Image (cartoon, helix red, strand yellow):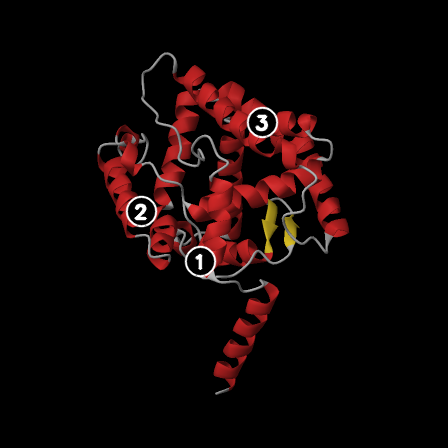
Amino acid sequence: MKKLISLVAAMAFFMVLCDLTPADAFRQTGMNYLAQQTGESGDKPSETVMGEGSAEAEVEEEEDDEFDEYDDEYEDEEDVVLIADPLIRVNTGLYHFNDKLYFWLLKPVAQGYEFIIPVEFRSIIRNMFYNIRFPVRFVNCLLQGKGQKAVAEASSFFLNTTIGILGMADAASHWPHLVVSKEDLGQTFAVWGFGNGAFLTLPFLGPSSVRDGLGLVGDIFLDPFFWVDMDLKTRIALRGGETVNDTSLRIGQYEALKEAAIDPYVMIRNAYVQNRNKLIAE
């Protein structure tokens, strides 16, 4: 009985904290943002074809196009408040911490990694990590009642695991209807009617919100790596290696965004919220 009361109290606190809103109204808000888009979100990894001489140029072009769309979409709305930010002083401090961490540690390491490892292999690594985390996306599609998207995710996983050789190549990208934006528990909470709550800047992880932060914790249990028996050092090394690999494929994007912004913190905060609303509406 005590456990039940504690669970009900926790859920009530979560509802108040995240400002529960009707799911349909939230979806309509997301659709308004979606109407402003001119292209797709670019969350799906690019296709990797081993042996192509122009692979590096293609990856860089795709990454640049994605960033250009992201930058153009949000640069004119920098001073618009899209989310409550009562912890702005703490968030700003953590933003500067993450910023220094990127320029002083992550970027130099990623540049050295980029110099050593060919782009074909780095793309393969990114595709494999994406493929392994299929359960996170698939389960959240089901929780949101997005049946067609769940089928697309399952089909992509099957094709990439078989034809794509354990996810090394993004074979599913040859079928455009299988290329869908990824889902997570934060988006699931939004579809269920929970608002953003307060904005958060998480150390090492970047911009988030109360809702998405809780969703991130829940997604950990859907991640296959969580269920693999390994010590903490190995987990940290695995996650760090993935981060360095991903960063090596998009060096320059954050720098350009920061240079174009009057207030980089505000721009990143608003860009994060609008991009999340777009993903939720898809």
Rendering coords of residue 261 (x, y %): 69, 30
- 3 and 2 marks in contact (CB < 8 Å): no
Q: Which secondary structure lies at badge 2?
A: helix
Marks 3 and 1, Cα distance to the nearest angstrom? 34 Å
Q: Which of marks 2 and 3 precedes in the sequence?
A: 2
Q: Position of residue 52 (x, y in %)?
A: 33, 15
Which element is circle 3 on? Answer: helix
Label 1 amino acid? Asp
Foreground tag (2 vs 1): 1
Residue beneath label 3, please? 253
Mark 3: amino acid: Gln
Viewer-closest of 44 and 269? 269
Q: Kindly tell me whether residue 249 is visible in this rendering.
A: yes
- Image coordinates of residue 123 in percent, x first then y, are 41, 27
Q: Which of 98 and 227 lies nearest the eye of the viewer?
A: 98
**Is the residue marked by circle 2 packed among few (<14), some (14-19), or many (20+) residues within 10 Å?**
many
Which residue occupies 28% across, 42% down?
157
Residue 149 is labelled as 2
Q: Residue at x 72, y 54 (%)?
A: 87
Tell me the residue that label 1 is attached to: 24
Look at the picture and state if 154 lies above or below 106. Answer: below
Furthest toward the right, the residue is 89
Q: Of the residues shown, which amino acid type is indicated by label 2?
A: Lys
